[in-house]
Structures are given as structure tokens and as C-alpha cells.
Image (tube, rainbow, N blue to C red):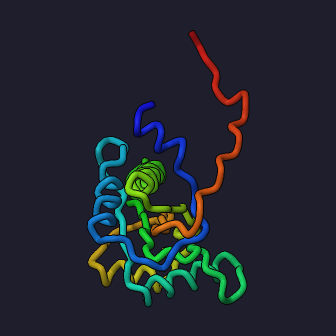
Amino acid sequence: MNDIIKAMQERRSIRRFKPDMPAKADIEQVLEAGLYAANGRGKQAAIAIAVTNKEMRDRISDINRRIGGWEEGFDPFYGAPVIIIVLADKECSTYMYDGSLMMGNLMLAAHSLGLGSIWIHRAREEFETEEYKKLLADLGISGEWEGIGHCALGYADGDAPQPAPRKDGRVFWIE
């Protein structure tokens, strides 16, 4: 079987991470793969913010937890030491798709390097707040951006979950 298709079939969302920080070179490879995601009309409307600073990572986790309505102490990023935030330029008509494709590339690249990942939502709500708009400004990012998702990244703490059986009746042919 082709290695890429095999990775697509084997990649799973990881919900328990070791605290060990992945090598920066591996994080850079994951980010590079995200930059090569398919995108509408070649606009490359999605960007990524890699968060490896533990204090900032924990702050983002706490804000995400509050938006999600969980109890204090819950980590919606499951202990992952790296958070890659994907945003997309709202002025591009394909921004949601472009950001989603970037997320997919990030997760597949992580899997190919022996890292675990999971897509965590609520980035849209985060980047509607003044605090997050200021974060973008502090990073020199201007424009109208929508948070697409967080790719929580790190080493899995335990085995990957088994895949759910695929539902029948989801492929149709016109020959």
C-alpha cells in the first residue's frame, strides 16, 4: 500500500500526550507540510502560529477550556506540549477550506514523524476576542483572520485508538 494512503488510514486523534517537547526540526517539518496544503486559486490564505512556550500554551488552554464550558483544571489539549493554531484570511472566499486542508496536512505530517495530534476547535471564538486580536497585532499579523482550529501536537502517551468501522453507503459511482 502507498505510504501516504497508509498514513491516512492509520492516523488517529490522540487524547493523551507525554510532556516531552518534540524536536524543533520535527515541528518545522510539520509546519512546512501545512504550508503545502491545497488552497483555493493558489491564494495561500491560511497561516499557522506555533506555540511552544509553556506559559502561553497553558494560557491558550485555559481560555479554550472556558469557551468550551469545562471545569477548571481540564486541559482541552490533552497535555500536548505544542499547539499549532491555524487561521485563515476572511477576505479569501475559500478561507475555511484552505485552513481545514492545512489542518489535515499538519496532522498527517505529525503522524508520519511519529508524533500524535488532534484537531481542537474553538479557535474561531478565541480570535473574536480583543485579547487574541492583540496577540495577532503583537505578532505583526494584520487583516481579518478567522481561527480555524488548533493542532495539538506531541508524543502520544499510550497506544493510538483503534479505528471505528467505516460506514457503508458513503461512496456512490456514476460510470
Q: Which one is in front, 147 or 163? A: 163
Choose top left, top right, bottom left or bottom right for residue 13. bottom right
Q: Residue at x 71, y 40 (%)?
A: 165
Horizontally, residue 55 falls left or right of residue 140, namely right
Residue found at the very far top of the displayed protein: 175
Horizontally, residue 80 falls left or right of residue 29, namely right
Q: Which one is in front, 162 or 76? A: 162
Image position, residue 101 (x, y; %):
44, 49
In the picture, the quarter occupied by the C terminus is: top right
Q: Is residue 148 above or below residue 18?
A: above
Q: Residue at x 40, y 38 (%)?
A: 3
Q: Is residue 48 above or below residue 56?
A: above
Image position, residue 104 (x, y; %):
46, 51
Q: Which one is in front, 163 or 71? A: 163
Q: Is residue 16 visible?
A: yes
Q: Is residue 124 visible?
A: no
Q: Residue at x 55, y 77 (%)?
A: 79
